Image (cartoon, helix red, strand yellow):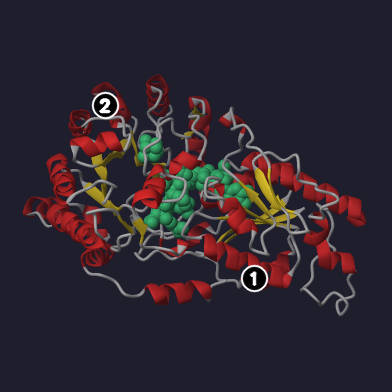
Amino acid sequence: MRVVLINPKFRLPIDTRTSPHLALAYLGAVSERRGDDVRVYDADVEDQPLQEFLHEFRPHLVGITTNTPQVKQAWRTAAAIKQEMDIPIVLGGPHVSVMSEELDYESLRQPQVDLIVRGEGEGPWIEISNIVDSFLRDQGLGDARQTTEVITTKAGDWRDQGSTPRSNDFSRSLMAPELDLFREVKSVSYKTGDGELHRNPDGPVIADLDSLPWPAYHLFKMDRYTNLQPATDAVPGERSFSIMTSRGCPYRCTFCSQSIMPIKWRARSSENVIEEWRHLVRDLGALEIGVLDDSANIRRPRLMQLADMLIANQLNHVPWIFVNGIRANLADMELLVKMKQAGLKRTAFGVETGDEQMIIKIDKHVDHNTIRQAFKNAKAAGIETIGFFIIGLPGDTRASMQKTIDFAIELDPMIANFSMMTPYPGTIVYEQVKRDGRFLVTDWEDYVFFDTKARYEMGDLTAELMEEMYRKAYRQFYWRPKYVMRTMQRKDFWLNFGRNLRLAWRTVIPRKEKTELRQAMMGAV
Ligand code: B12
Ligand code: SF4
């Protein structure tokens, strides 16, 4: 069977780098293992128009990934596909996984969307593929993996093209209510042909992550990405890759979208991780690696073992980074020193707030002294640090936000990343704003946090105050003589000078080109 996996075009309001989508790389890998002919269409880097690609490849099944700001573009992409051919369209990713707000149903109400996969996708995606494949065979198309017959034609054109009426009705007959083919597939929501919406119960998480194949990077046009790993150094010409050694997070911070994904933290075996790591370094030529785990250091002995194995396998000469942060309460000196020996160059920590009361309110389960110690340990071990901070948490005041800025200055990480609080649906903060505040954004496309505009107001926490403190955070942190001097001594600062300058400009000067961006996206399908 021919399947295509799509990343809809989404342009952030800042100049970010592009990187291959790990979810699509995993889904592509399991589809290939199933025996499918797979293509990835990443609209961020593709120059072939979607229509032309579809007619050339003639897929039987389409999967589209989507986070919150991307979802409308995902719908537009799905509509553009259905204009060309009536094939089943599946949406997956963080946005459509939010059941509390019925965001699976929101997407299913779009006429062009047939199925939604909620949460971890590999299992349900393969079950859907199996069903579509058997359906195609039952319809007399034989082995869908072999067939070259065009089963999909532009809506209304089937007579002209000498195809069969059924081929023009592929997804409609697949979704027929009397067949109800997807009723047993766990973690899937779907729409039958009569317009009825269905939500199946959640399925189990993948207990054995070693059972997954490695991400299928060969499906991507790798030379088109500006940097394979967005949070690493992007030294021109260098190849950097992502890796995920564990999935899930046992914490539930009130602002974090991870709460919509499985709470059960699971790790791959060190042996399995080392094999992929070796493949990235030796076969794909990785010169830097970004570890994408949400909470890599939940089980200390595992990380110690992984570090030992990186050293023993002589893979520690390739620098790597914990791009999303590790838990500060589980970052002791011995562990950090060992990881430094294993090649760890830089790590992020989620600090979020400098206010003692706020850190309790957001369920971070860590205190400021522990965070101080973690930064001290990392620096003493020779590891560069990144701090993640949030401006405008519910309950924040001018004084508490100033404490966040002051704490960032005290910790003095190499990079301080201040985000304007963006209440993503499915999080506790979203519920708080719904109950006690007022959303200032009504369009999913505005749910990006690389933006200088406030997303909500609550009590005394006004948009003006949040925006003022956000700009102040960047100004006070980055425009310190000590910081400027130190940064200018770094080689990669000069290599990325243009980008750094644009980023700095965007954070202090309000931007006005959102409409232009939106128009560019709409024209991009
Ligand atoms: C790496 C990363 C990035 C990178 C690269 C993104 C990329 N192209 O891969 C960058 C830095 C560019 C980025 C940017 C943003 N990101 Co980001 N990012 C991540 C991160 C850390 C890892 C993503 C990943 O690779 N996960 C591993 C894969 C295997 O998991 P997955 O993506 O969830 O996919 C699984 C399922 O969701 C599902 N699935 C996904 N797609 C599909 C499609 C189909 C058809 C099916 C069947 C299933 C399916 O199956 C997959 C395999 O199990 C996640 C956090 C996380 N742990 O996932 C945040 C995360 C996805 N990002 C998030 C956000 C908010 C953003 C931004 C909007 C932030 C901003 N700047 O404003 C932007 C949007 C960028 C864009 N272009 O759309 C949120 C999304 C929340 C939401 N409700 O949408 C997350 C969850 C972080 C968080 N905890 O809040 N991000
Ligand atoms: S912020 Fe980090 S620790 Fe908190 S829930 Fe999200 S991933 Fe887990």
Question: Observer-nearest residue: 178 or 286?
Answer: 178
- What residue sits right under mark 1 in the picture? 80
The local crowd at label 2, few if under 14, some if 14 to 19, many if 20 or more residues have their Cα within 10 Å, is some
Residue at 24% x, 41% y is 385
Q: Is residue 514 left or right of residue 282?
A: left
Question: Observer-nearest residue: 111 or 518?
Answer: 111
N-terminal label among 1 and 2: 1
Whether residue 349 is visible: yes
The tag on residue 132 is none
Three-letter code for the amino acid on which mark 1 is drawn: Ala
Name the spot of residue 129 as percent of width and height, x first. Answer: 74, 47
Name the spot of residue 353 as percent of width and height, x first. Answer: 23, 42
Residue at 36% x, 51% y is 433
**Outermost top residue:** 301
Three-letter code for the amino acid on which mark 2 is drawn: Val
**Outermost bottom residue:** 160
- What residue sits right under mark 2 in the picture? 337
**Outermost left residue:** 481
Q: Is residue 298 left or right of residue 46?
A: left
The local crowd at label 1, few if under 14, some if 14 to 19, many if 20 or more residues have their Cα within 10 Å, is some
Check disc 2 and report its element: helix, strand or loop: helix
Check disc 1 and report its element: helix, strand or loop: helix
Name the spot of residue 67 as percent of width and height, x first. Answer: 50, 54
Give the vertical position of 504 relative to 1 (above or below).
Answer: below
Some atom of ligand 1 lies within 8 Å of the CB belonging to the residue at label 1: no
**Outermost right residue:** 140
Name the spot of residue 335 as percent of width and height, x first. Answer: 30, 24
**Which quadrant does the C terminus fall into?**
bottom right
